[in-house]
Image (tube, rainbow, N blue to C red):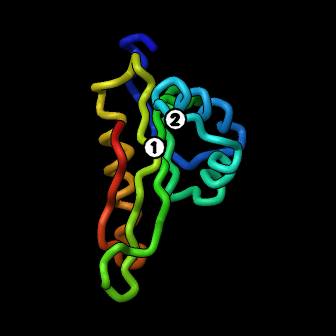
Amino acid sequence: FGEAMRSFEVGNVRSKDLEELRTLLNECLPVLYDDSFYEMCVQLSEPFTRLAYLQDSVVGALVIRPEPARCQCVNALTCYVLALAVHPRLRRKGIASSLLRDWIHSIKELPAYHDVYLHVQ
């Protein structure tokens, strides 16, 4: 991932990318997800699973699970950030920010979301 390779794209998860996604998350996060997690990533797809690609390789990931809201709001949903990861050699280059911005833009078209939360270790 040299300096000349700074251009990345944000896109949907593809079945062919699941092993790269698994490798990235295993390298970046203290959690080992089972196969059902990766199946969920494909099922949720856009906008809840977004990947950053650099030359067709997965270099970043954002996985969000929609859930009923924790508040008493009618028809409100909440979003739980299950995973946000960027390849260690590509951090501080705006990839995670781009994934989050892309997701925020995507959910503007969807039903009302009340909040977003995540667990940090």
* Residue at screen point 40% across, 63% down: 79
Between 81 and 2, the one nearer to me in the picture: 81
Q: Nearer the viewer, residue 65 or 5?
A: 65
99 displayed left or right of 43: left
Identify whether 67 is placed above or below 62: below
- Crowding near pointer 1: few (<14 within 10 Å), some, many (20+)? some
Residue sitting farthest toward the top: 2
* Residue 39, label in figure: none
Residue type at mark 1 is Ala
Residue 45, percent across and down?
58, 56
Residue 13: horizontal and vertical position, in percent? Answer: 59, 46
Q: Amino acid at mark 2?
A: Val
Mark 2 lies on a secondary structure that is loop
Q: Which mark is residue 83?
A: 1
Q: On the picture, is 60 further left or further right than 42?
A: left
Image spot of residue 68 (x, y percent): 44, 74
Q: Which residue is mark 2?
A: 31
Quadrant placement of the C terminus: top left
Number of marks in the rendered image: 2
Say if 16 sits above or below 1 in the image.
below
- Dot 1 falls on a residue whose secondary structure is strand
Cα distance between the residues tagged 1 and 2? 10 Å
Position of residue 25 measured from the top left corner of the image (x, y, whole percent): 53, 32
The residue drawn where x is 60% and y is 40% is 33
Q: Earlier in the sequence, mark 1 or mark 2?
A: 2
